[in-house]
Image: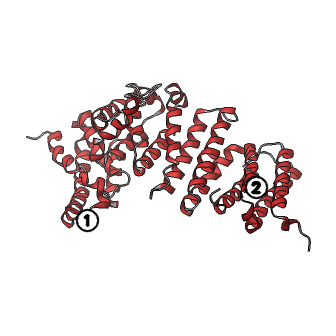
Amino acid sequence: MFTVSEKLEPFLHGLQVPAEYTRYENITEATTLTRLAEWKTSADRILKEVQSILDHRKGELLTQDHANIIASVASFDGEGPWIMDSARSTAQAVLSQGFPEVETALLVQLLTHNIKPRFQLSPHPWLDASGRKLLRPAGGTMGSQDFYDEQSWKSSPGIVNVLSWCVRHVSPDQYANLWHLIIPPVMSLLDDFAAKYKLRGCEIVAEMLLQVPGSLLKRTGLDSLIRSSLNTCLTYLNNPEAPQLIKASVATSLALTKLTTSAGSAEQFDQLCALLGDGIISGIWLYAYDQPDIVVASLEALAPVLRALKIGNARFLKLLRILMEECAPCIPRWKTAILDGIVRSWVTLKDRQTASEPNRDSRECRYSIISARHMIRPVFHYFTANFEDLRDELRHTCESLGQFCPSVIEVN
């Protein structure tokens, strides 16, 4: 007579995602592709079998069994070339109906026995055993190399989706006890050399920031470590994932800053300025000026940062004047675009000042000037006070435009 655990074992084994899916986009062998397609179809059927067992005999299962089920089924709760739409729907039904509330003991079992073994051969050089940031990387200068040498977790393609499921089900009061189990695999993803894993790491950090206490991030030093890793994401500009990675890393950096700093504080202002100035303007716009998809992605990510900066945006009007000085030969071509942004901002400023509205909501010149134009417009939707400073900055900007392009002040 088989126990429920024994009956489940072959089904869970059949849900193990083949390691070939790690390099699926590079597979050309017809036999391999056929085998993987057959497995994908069978996985959809197996998920329904597991759902049936849970519906009728869940009470006979131990915590270890629950963890093994989640580790197998959650591989299909997310994205991946091994996931059919029907399989994803079944997996989500199994997880939501079978495990509506996730206790700490179950998360400990999952993180300790189903996730940690995949990552422990490549410990993160900047983390100690408790999940705190080290003062200097373990292993010295060779620590990072060792971190990339043994990446056995990549032979389990579904493990990233399992980690994401765990993070989404950790409550704020559980984080302190689970910190040493959550942070190492999350940082392994975020600091991987491949852009596709950085993107997944960024997405999981964003999920974590919805629940994790900001005080825990600061106490363990992870706020600065994560911020540094997110800044590195902004340098991965020559990858297919670059536009997605830029938008995800900027949004996650902004969420991290808001969570770990006080609103309106100098610390928050400095971090936002660094994100905009060093990350986007001096980084992306300088080195990816000739890649429109990346520039557009950075502009799409820009608005929330400008909202958060509010009056601080005025300092970046000085950037536009510098750009006009450095790119003087190009200014006549772009005078209309620049003037459009200035005039719209001036009108908005005067309208709000009159109504006394309350607070609310060079390598190449071309992309730099376009970016500066986009930077001006949102500034005046999110200011808090000090109309005079903003008016003066706009006036100085107009004077600079007239200096480098006299035709804008000609009267016919």
Amino acid found under the numbered disc labelled 1 = Thr
Q: Is residue 239 above or below residue 269?
A: below
- Seen as rendered, the residue at the extreme left is 1
How far apart are the two marked residues, 1 and 2, measured between alpha carbons? 53 Å
At x 65% / y 36%, what residue is drawn?
Answer: 268
Q: Position of residue 287 (x, y in %)?
A: 56, 54
Q: Is residue 228 above or below residue 390?
A: above
Of the numbered discs in the image, which one, if any, rests on residue 311? none
Comparing 235 with 350, the one in front is 235
Residue 159 visible: yes
Comparing 351 with 306, the one in front is 306
Q: Quadrant of the N terminus?
A: top left
Q: Position of residue 273 (x, y in %)?
A: 66, 42
Q: Which residue is mark 1?
A: 28
Drawn side of residue 198 relative to residue 298, left or right = left
1 or 2: tag closer to the N-terminus: 1
At x 87% / y 52%, what residue is drawn?
Answer: 355
- Neighbor class of circle 2 (other Cα within 10 Å; few <14, some 14-19, many 20+) is some
Residue 337 visible: no
Q: Position of residue 354 (x, y in %)?
A: 89, 52
At x 53% / y 44%, what residue is drawn?
Answer: 252
Q: Which residue is mark 2?
A: 325
At x 38% / y 36%, what residue is drawn?
Answer: 144
Drawn side of residue 63 relative to residue 166, left or right = left
Comparing 245 with 409, the one in front is 409
Drawn side of residue 377 relative to residue 25, left or right = right
